[in-house]
Amino acid sequence: MDRARTIETTGTVDDRRQLHLDSPLSLAGPARVRVIVVFEDDDDFPENEWLEAAASNPLFDFLKHSTEDIYTA
């Protein structure tokens, strides 16, 4: 590829492991493309669990000190 462009879109991988895009690409075809698939790992904790763990971790207790409050006038 001489000059690469990037288009971000979403899609679904079906039970036959085929990718189906949610919307058509704004790309004149036929053309070969490079595909990078980013997906959520099932072993990851949901974001709210990470936030709850960080909020209750004593390692971050220093943030409760009044000198760390940069948002109150």
Image: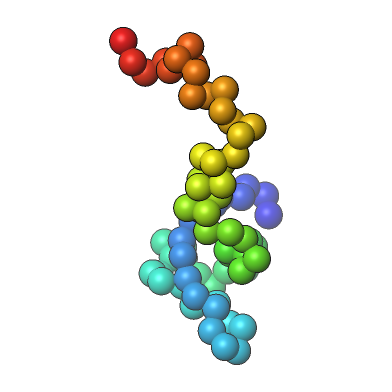
Q: Which residue is found at the position 54% from the left and 73% from the top?
A: 30
- Is residue 35 visible from the viewing direction of this image? no
Left or right of 28? Residue 1 is: right
Taking the view exactly as shown, the residue that stands out farthest to the bottom is 16
Quarter of the picture holding the N terminus: bottom right
Q: Which residue is found at the position 31% from the left and 10% from the top?
A: 73
List x then y, in percent, for residue 29.
Answer: 50, 70
List x then y, in percent, for residue 25.
Answer: 44, 65
Q: Which residue is found at the position 64% from the left and 32% from the top?
A: 59
Q: Which residue is found at the position 54% from the left and 84% from the top?
A: 14
Residue closer to the observer: 18 or 70: 70
| The quadrant where residue 43 appears | bottom right
Residue closer to the observer: 32 or 54: 54
Taking the view exactly as shown, the residue that stands out farthest to the right is 1
Left or right of 20? Residue 34 is: right
Residue closer to the observer: 27 or 19: 19
- Is residue 50 visible from the viewing direction of this image? yes
Left or right of 29? Residue 3 is: right
Task: Judge whether 66 appears above or below 26 on screen.
Answer: above
| The quadrant where residue 41 appears | bottom right
